[in-house]
Amino acid sequence: MSRNLDADALSRVSAHAVPPHGTDVRSAEFRGPLFTEWRQAMRGEALRTTVGGATPEALRERVGIPSIAQREVWEQADPITIERIRAAAAESLGHPWADALGSLFARYVRDGDRATYERAVSDRQERLTGAVAAAAVTDEQTWIDEAADGAVVLCEQSTWSLPAHDDAHARRGFVLPDVASPYLDLVAGEIVAQLAVADRLLGPRWDESWPGLRERIRHEAETRVFTPFETRDDLWWLGYWREVNNWNPWILGNVLLAAVLLLDDSERVARILARALDSLDRYVAELPADGAIDEGVAYWWNGAGRMLEMLDIVAAITDGGLDATGIPVVAETLRFPMRMHLGGDWYVNVADGWARSRGHEPWQLPFRWGTLTGDARVTAWARAARRPEAPVAHVAGGLPRLVRALADTAWRDAVPAAAPLPAAVWLPSVQVLVRRSGDGTAAGLALAAKGGTNDENHNHKDLGSFLVAAGGRQLLVDVGKPTYTAQTFSAERYRIRAMQSGWHNAPAPFGLEQGEGPVFAAQVIAAPRGEPGPAPLAADPAVLELELAGAYPLPAGDSWRRTFRFDGTGSPSGTERIEVADRWRLSEDGAHRLHLIAAGKVTPSAGGVEVAADGHRIRIAATAGSTPIVPALEEWELDDPELIAVWGPRLTRLVYSVGGRAGTFTTVIEEIS
């Protein structure tokens, strides 16, 4: 089973007792990059001194979440952000809170719909975040009461876990959550951190006008989060018996923040910290040296980005004793999304990622970490997204991230900068190439190509696929993630069109789909040069050659090679061009297809096909041997709101048909000015 099938599926199928039979999940102390860096300082005894020896209030002050009583902080909060939040919050004031009904929760089991219930919970959380921010800034009772109502609504919610993650159906056949045995998932972590930050901000006012509310928050946090976290080793995302993914730092960071803000026992906080670090070290150990995230940029924010936020908390509560800024893999991982930037809000996307920024990423996070590590390119990339007329953060990012951004005057005052846009990036761990004509410009063409394996997190069958952007805008595209349903993380995953190799820019020998799992992989024959460091396999910085036969259920000895070349002067007009050359040698004769997925207006033209969108145009010409080939065009009328938000109403698949036991096929892409 591919890893993308068990991130959600394992938590859903048997989350309470999933380790393989006979597995001792805590048989030895784990020693990863964090332990190697910090050694004795990370051990329980040291943490009991640095953390357990501090007062609870001292720990809270170290994490820098300002109380409503700290008026100087809130009076200097970015006024544009506050005004947007207050205006949006005022629209909800006096209206009923979103209903997270049992019938909506049950839909996940009944008809596979997970999005409707998730939207209701998200609406509650965003409304509470807006109310807390408005209360902190204005110190008005109306907003203090609104925030209290939101806190009570979440405390009364039957579960903080999502139906797609909750295990009550698998264990007991329930279509509702099992309130006697709460599951600790991503959203449970988000909610406990949100309530903890709300308690920290508004606690003095709630003590005056809402006595009992803070005790209720602590009771629910204890039952739903702290006790499960401290007592259960079988939660898969802890990493004690299987590989971890973005769940690990996402949950750990939120649990740790909530523990610091809600618990009045510093020694217990130290124990939670020790357990959290032991688990986080397993995530850090899986990060490759080049910093690549196989789930892509969209998941960086809620994976590696969450790791950085947690490490920030760790440094704070240990009073600088555990500082991760000098750990090489942390610095490289920080740079990953900057390296995947195509221009504007467009990014190289893989797996379940989106091709465009969603508009509410927590840009203060890379800005702060770029500053901490002295990485001017990362801070410039973050500043490229900063608009003085726009909010410094959004309620959709969650209350902790919003408060961090509002309290960061350096981020408030940051001026826009030009994005670095590296000319050449080669990430060998995931076999991803990004190539453009020069540093710092989105003008002209950009190529991104991918090898890897079909066992990546949130995997799509995309080996040998590529995308092309003009002026930073994707025109030959990776479709990305549609709305999640029960099918998404199940054995039926690859029946979803967007996840099939036939709907990626990949070949299809004999019309085959790529295989599933770790044995189906691309092999690098020649690699380019490019940051984060020079690769030894090829001298040409613009060429990547992959053997793709291993991606398909083909006989041993068959070969399908694909070579990507970025040429700045190779076309007759002297303009940039991208060449993708396929060469195959197979044991049998047959019919083959090559696919390209285009976003924009697609029209036949002399010598090929043109694709145009947002003022950018490319021409695609293809030849089999020396014979020009005209593709068949298949339109995909999109009906998924997430895909429409990125691509508009439709995508077009270009299908090239060829044949033979051996042959060549060349695709040339040029920009049309």
Image (spheres, rainbow, N blue to C red):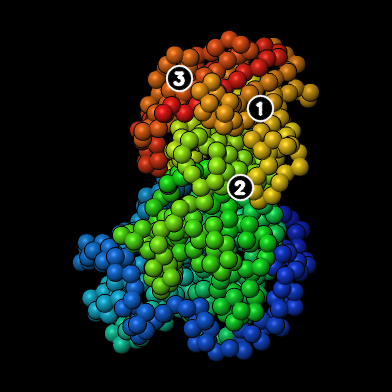
Of the pair 293 and 107, the residue shown nearer to us: 293
Label 2 sits on a secondary structure element that is: loop
Badge 1 crowding class, 10 Å Cα cut-off, few under 14, some 14 to 19, many 20 or more, is many
Q: Is residue 508 visible?
A: no
Does any portion of residue 471 appear in the rendered image?
A: yes
Amino acid under label 1?
Arg
Q: Which mark is residue 658?
A: none
Q: Nearer the viewer, mark 2 or mark 1?
A: 1
Count of number-bearing discs: 3
Query: In the rendered view of the protein, which quadrant contains the C terminus?
Result: top left
Is 78 left or right of 305, judged from the image as shown? left
- Image coordinates of residue 9 in percent, x first then y, are 57, 49
Mark-to-mark CA distance, 2 and 1? 21 Å
Which residue is denoted by mark 2 in the rendering?
Answer: 294
Residue beneath disc 3: 609
- The amino acid beneath tag 2 is Asp
Please determine whether, in this image, residue 537 is positioned above or below residue 72.
Answer: above
Residue 518: x %, y % from top left: 70, 40
Q: CA distance from mark 2 to mark 3?
A: 32 Å
> Nearer the N terminus, badge 3 or badge 1?
1
* Residue contact at pointers 2 and 1, CB within 8 angstroms: no
Q: Which mark is residue 562?
A: 1
Residue 589: image quadrant is top right
Residue at 39% from the left image edge and 81% from the top image edge:
67
User: Element type at marker 3?
Assistant: strand
Which is more N-terminal, label 1 or label 2? 2
Residue 36 location in percent, x, y?
75, 68
Question: Of the residues under marks 2 and 3, which one precedes in the sequence?
Answer: 2
Residue 85 placement, left or right of 191 = left
